[in-house]
Amino acid sequence: MSQSTPLPDHRQTTSPAPHLEAWSLPPGWSWGHEAIQREHRHYQEVIDALGRSLSLVSAPDSSQDEWLKNEARALAHRNHPSIPTTYHYWASYQESRRGPGYLRRWIGGETVYSRVTRLGPEAIPFALQVLREAGSTLAYLHDTGAAHGAISASTIWLTPGGRLWVLGWEWVLPRDQRPAGFQPDAAYTPWPPEWSDAEWRPTPASDQWQLAAMLFTMLTGETPPEHDVPPISLLRPDCPQALAAVLERSLAPKPEDRFPSIAAMLRDMDRHVSVRQVMIAPEGDELPPALDSAEARLRWATADDYEILSPLGSGMFGSVWRARDLSLSREVAIKVLHPHIAKDDTAVARFRREARLAAQLAHAAIVPIYDTDSRGDIVWYTMELAEGGSVASLVSRSGPRQFEEIAPQVDEVLEALHAAHTSGIIHRDLKPENILIDRYRRWRIGDFGIAYALGEEGAGTSGTPSFAAPEQLLGEAQGPATDCYALASIVYFVITGRAPFGDGPAETILAQQLSGTLPARLEEDGFPEALGGWLLNGLAARVEDRFADALEMRIAWRQVVRATRRAEDQRPWWRRLIEGLQEDEPVEPPSGW
């Protein structure tokens, strides 16, 4: 992509930034494991006394404290689902040893820029969905008499759960509430042609140009030039002509040649390009023949109860959608069987059984099931929306995780797994994709699709090969130790970024599992002794050599956590200092150094 220098997304950290080192958080609070440094703001994850991940927004330069306060005050009065509201502002008092800074929601996920860099140009329906949500936010802002001025692929954030957030709110303030001479860096922010004299003058028309520039980036992977923007059809031949016309008008060099407002731009786009249609559900349960797309069918089936917002993912047997429960005014996830699968009575019974088994398990680390229903041949159930995506998507976006970050999450998952085993339910398909993450970054077990109750037939091949125990791949009897193996594999994956025995065919993985090379693998990967021993036990090929159940595994995990923390505390300060400097996160030497 042609953006000069990408702004960083989340970065793992072991200690607070230098300007936060003197801070004292309230009792029961702790520093989180991620932070973001932007041009004038620092965003540090903090964990409050309720276990929620929050973002502490601060200004490393103390001369900008008043600017920060004005930003916090303005956000406290914004009311839009894509704008993060201020929860609390900490003023600077010597007695409290904290401040100034404000708290808001911690936003997981990644920027549009990072997503396009990672995955390449977007599919047109998805890009239009992002445009609508970002455009809705800007239309709301313009109705309040303000303009943004810093819309770019680096200020639009997308969460794995389908939420969109618009950031960069330090710029959305009256001129007298910002430091004189400050403006967004042109290296990160596309400048419309009317700013060619290098003077930043945000207006609704410039926001429209920047919004269209973001869409151009999503469709092509490139930031459009200020002048002589190439026709989108040359770079993206599959772009509908009507969409190309909307984009061309919004990127017009002269503001007066653009749409009169972003609302008008969105209306024109929906009139000619919309991939959604408002439908009035007819009486009865017969599916109208014209509704042949997955989204149209689901909208028809759930129209009285849910508003379908966006797709979250699709697999071999079904798809998952983000939706709004119209009765309770909350967002949920809807899992629906593919139509051809729904014609199989056995598959439908198994699908409903999955919902029933999961609904039996009331635990904070198990995704709750709300309801199950059907209409015609559309079969679905609703569950809590995992706004943070999955452990698999987390590692894909941000890389391997630190032990200290995952330690409490693994403990909670083990407790949930023990609750399932105590209830007589074996999951049998634990994998990174099935460990979901909620808005507070807590891990939760989902997808009990091939689970079975103890006492039922538990043999037969099952699970995902990369995370399946040998007895699963051999089609032998399975029990609690089978889930323990899968969870150990997940821990290995999260810390290293890869499955313990690769992701090849089941036969190849089974051969590796039975080869006896695991100790050498763990030593080669540099696992500490305590953690390596835990993995060796959890990944043992023979069931009798493995943890017997999740309770035993959890007790051993807690011993690993204590041993790892003791070892960390005993390391020389100078070694921690060197490693901290390598992370660009200084560690304070002892006083007097």
Image: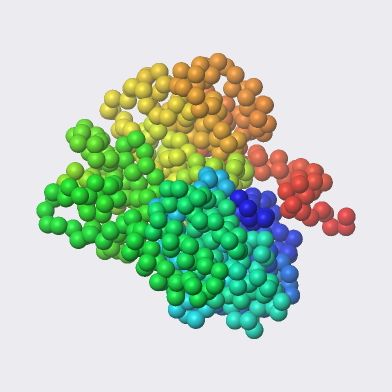
Q: Is residue 52 left or right of residue 351?
A: right
Q: Is residue 76 visible?
A: no
> Whole-percent x and y of residue 454?
31, 30
Residue drawn 66% across the image and 40% down it: 564
Rendered-image quadrant of the C terminus: bottom right
Q: Nearer the viewer, residue 520 or 283?
A: 283
Q: Is residue 574 above or below residue 63?
A: above
Image point (16%, 50%), residue name: 288
Q: Quadrant of residue 476?
A: top left
Image side of residue 53 versus residue 44, left or right: left
Q: Nearer the viewer, residue 232 or 58?
A: 232
Q: How many marks?
A: 0
Q: Residue 162's x, y, as percent?
A: 43, 54
Q: Residue furthest bottom?
A: 176
* For residue 516, above or below residue 337: above
| Residue 407 image-quadrant placement | top right
Check the image and tell me how it is coloured.
rainbow
In front here: 357 or 386? 386
| Residue drawn at (65%, 78%) of the image | 178
In this orientation, which residue lies closer to the viewer: 419 or 93?
93
Which residue is at the far left? 284
